[in-house]
Amino acid sequence: MYGYSITVDRDLIISAVVAPTGVRGGFCSSMLKGHPLDRCFPVLLEDGSDAVKRVIDGGVPLFLKGYHTGCFCSDVTADISIQPVSADDGSICGAEISLVIVSGCPVVDILQKEQRLIDIGRYSAALAHGVRNPLNAIKGAVVYLKDAYGGEQTFAEFAAIIEEEISKLDGFITRFLSTSLLESEFVPVDVNELLRRILAMNSFQAYAKRISFSSELGVLPIIMADAFQLEHAVMNVINNSFEAMTESGDIRLKTRLVQRGGREFISILISDNGKGMTRDGQKGAGYSNEKRVEKGRGFGLFLTREIIQSHGGTIEIVSKKNMGTSVEMFLPVKGRDDG
């Protein structure tokens, strides 16, 4: 949470302000020293009296939970701790007021958005570099196996898919390290054919976990999309479904053409009967933060949301704890630039 602290002397003159740097509060804090507290902030009242003055006079700390007051740029609700400050001789020489913003401050939103971008840059760049070496090793192994066992038709088909996916991933990493994550290359894409390839690629993983795939692919038009990014977005959701289920689960894919706001969209619905998400988990789904990324959750859905939005689409998530999760992606038929 966002917070800051203010130190005042016995006359309630501000002697120090500690606030996060890089935001408006950090700039304002340097301008407040030497000014009376009540000229810069609303008076904190407790039972009709000045709470800071009471702590200084009585030497007893005070805690105000859910207190409505003002911060550097707006009205907020905060948890406020007021602690007496002692001089070298033990006498009370002032007070330290610590505020933790609970709601209402736009700086909180700014910090959260900035932290998400920092997380994306740090983790994804490390991931891109870390994947390249083992990817080259896998590619070499596939080439060898294809030469040695290429006569077996099923193996040859899957080896070709693996080779193609490795080449696309290697190209994506190269573009990512030299440009941006969502620099798209839009081409005509058959969404149903893309999903059939994804089903084939995941068939061995599903077999190993005794998870069944079922699909209901409707009649769809060709759309303009970045095929690699769209495949990545769908794979993120499917991998989350795998992680959410024990053996004998079920993953269902469904595509259809829908009308939303007077426009045509392709709907890609992916649902499972896994453990689902809590209410708090649903609120944070698709919005990465450092804690969730470190646990391996949230980052995939965040990327999926960014990819779908970069295509001019939207994503909707419905989940019930212990009953499964449904993720529906909507892609505009005529591309992201269609009015």
Image (cartoon, rainbow, N blue to C red):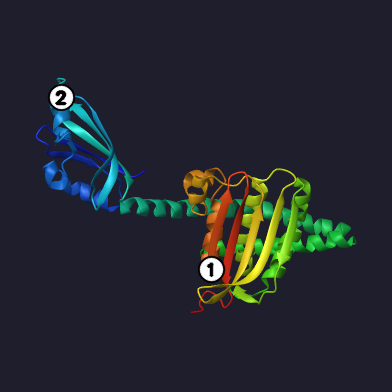
| Name of the residue lying farthest toward the top | 89
* Residue 234 coordinates in the image, percent (x, y): 63, 60
Secondary structure at badge 1 equals: loop
Q: Amino acid at mark 1?
A: Gly
Compared with 20, 45 (above or below) is above
Quadrant where the N terminus sits is top left
| Residue at the spot of label 2 | 58
Side of 293 where 273 appears, left or right: right
Q: Counting other residues with Cα less than 10 Å from the Cα at mark 2, is it few (<14), some (14-19), or many (20 or more)?
A: few
Marks 1 and 2, how far apart at CA: 60 Å
Q: Counting other residues with Cα less than 10 Å from the Cα at mark 1, is it few (<14), some (14-19), or many (20 or more)?
A: many
| Residue at the spot of label 1 | 313
| Name of the residue lying farthest toward the left | 11
* Residue 267 coordinates in the image, percent (x, y): 61, 67
Secondary structure at badge 2 equals: helix
Side of 338 where 33 appears, left or right: left
**Tally of numbered discs:** 2
* Residue 265 coordinates in the image, percent (x, y): 58, 72
**Which residue appears at 54% of the width and 76% of the height?**
263
Which image quarter: residue 188?
bottom right
Side of 59 where 76 appears, left or right: right
Toward the viewer: 146 or 196? Answer: 196
Residue 300 visible in rendering? no
Q: Amino acid at mark 2?
A: Gly
Q: Earlier in the sequence, mark 1 or mark 2?
A: 2
Residue 102 visible in rendering? yes
* Residue 122 coordinates in the image, percent (x, y): 49, 51
